[in-house]
Amino acid sequence: MPAMTRRNWFELLALPAWAPAAKLTITGLETFLAKVNRRGDWLLVRLQTSAGLSGLGDASQGGNDALTLRLLNQFFERLRGGGLAEIERLRAALEPEIARQGQPAAVALSALEQCLWDLQGQVFGVPCFELLGGRLHARIRNYANINRSTEDRSPAGFAQMAERAVRDGFDAVKLAPFDGMPRGDAAAIEAHTRLGIECARAVRKVIGAKRELLIDGHSHFDLERGLELARRLEPLNLFWLEEVTPARPVENLAAINRSAKMPTAGGESIYGVKGFWPYINAGAVDILMPDVKYCGGMLELKKISAMAEGAGMPVSPHGVASPVGNFAAAHVCASLPNFLILEYSYGEVRWRADLIDPPERLVNGRLELSARPGLGITLNDRVARQQAA
């Protein structure tokens, strides 16, 4: 990566306050694929500029890393030689590609968009949340998603991981205990459902009544079984029940939402404001969960959240992400009047804290955002390369 030289800095300082972003151009792209676990790796992106500044983004969990890498290089050619204020133009140009290629294209666009915000913040010397309307929340509450790190899928296995998260200060824990749901055989489906409920009960017992319990259905249920699941989970006093059925037809989620005694949440896989509007309009869920990687980036997350605010809905961004993705989402969350809680992929790798500098600082499950420019972090290249997939 080219260094920021003394001459580069003097060139920037000599410009009017409004000029640096217009003066810089995008010159290079780097990608880092780090091995995490069988549920997916972390694909990180770094854009370089003519002044030696670089910006970070997260393109993880797109479902096909090889395709995402190809699309990143393809999309980068639209940015090469251009300025930092290309976010809306880039999004509009790539809409057809996202319609054709789906989530791998969405995460590629989103990662590049995150890089541009990081760069703009650095050029103007302000954190990204200042560019997005200013900070309303000094610390961003995170819940510990223990699902991706729990290999022992028994009640005891989930309880053990939940206990770890509580010891680390989290006061909200999520699991998806119905993964691996069999198909077709009613008896097998019921047995697996009972096991999942037992897992949820075990976690509730270990975290206690005062901490929050979140359950993700991962769309494993049909309407009839989903309605019954909501009834069976009522005694656990859930913070929310997430995505019991697939997002389409949206009427099924809306029916469960009307019936459920606990709040419902969802929307993690939806792209763009146009995708979220029918979901919101149908009353599919109580709490909206756009993912900064899947929905189109930081600006799109801000727009979707504003649409939710108009509908009286809180927003809790989905985030099976690296620390880079977590910071990108957190900067948006800091500016949202209707922000509720952010997802944190707990316990996946021991080296998470070493991947960025400075590392994520979570105190009692709250992420502290500093006043450092841009996203406020840099990538530890040595760690990223050591963990290369």
Image: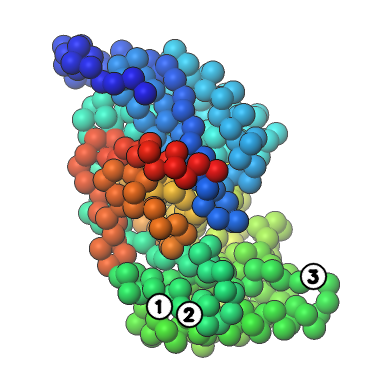
Residue 183: numbered disc: 3
Q: Quadrant of the N terminus?
A: top left
Nearer-the-camera pick, 105 or 238? 105
Tell me if residue 71 comes above or below residue 60 in the rendering: above
**Residue 248 x %, y %:** 70, 56
- Dot 3 amino acid type: Arg
**Residue 43 x %, y %:** 51, 41
Residue 285: numbered disc: none
Residue that numbered label 1 is attached to: 163
Circle 1: element type: helix
Nearer-the-camera pick, 124 or 89? 124
**Residue 274 x %, y %:** 58, 42
Are the residues at dot 2 and dot 1 in contact (C-beta closer than 8 Å)? yes
- Dot 2 amino acid type: Ala
Left or right of 291 on screen, residue 251:
right
Tell me if residue 72 comes above or below residue 244 in the rendering: above
Tell me if residue 88 comes above or below residue 233 in the rendering: above
Is residue 258 visible in the rendered image? The answer is no
Tell me if residue 88 comes above or below residue 304 in the rendering: above
Residue that numbered label 2 is attached to: 159
Is residue 207 visible in the rendered image? The answer is yes
Please tell me which residue is depicted at 62% across the width and 64% down the height of the picture: 218
- Dot 1 amino acid type: Glu
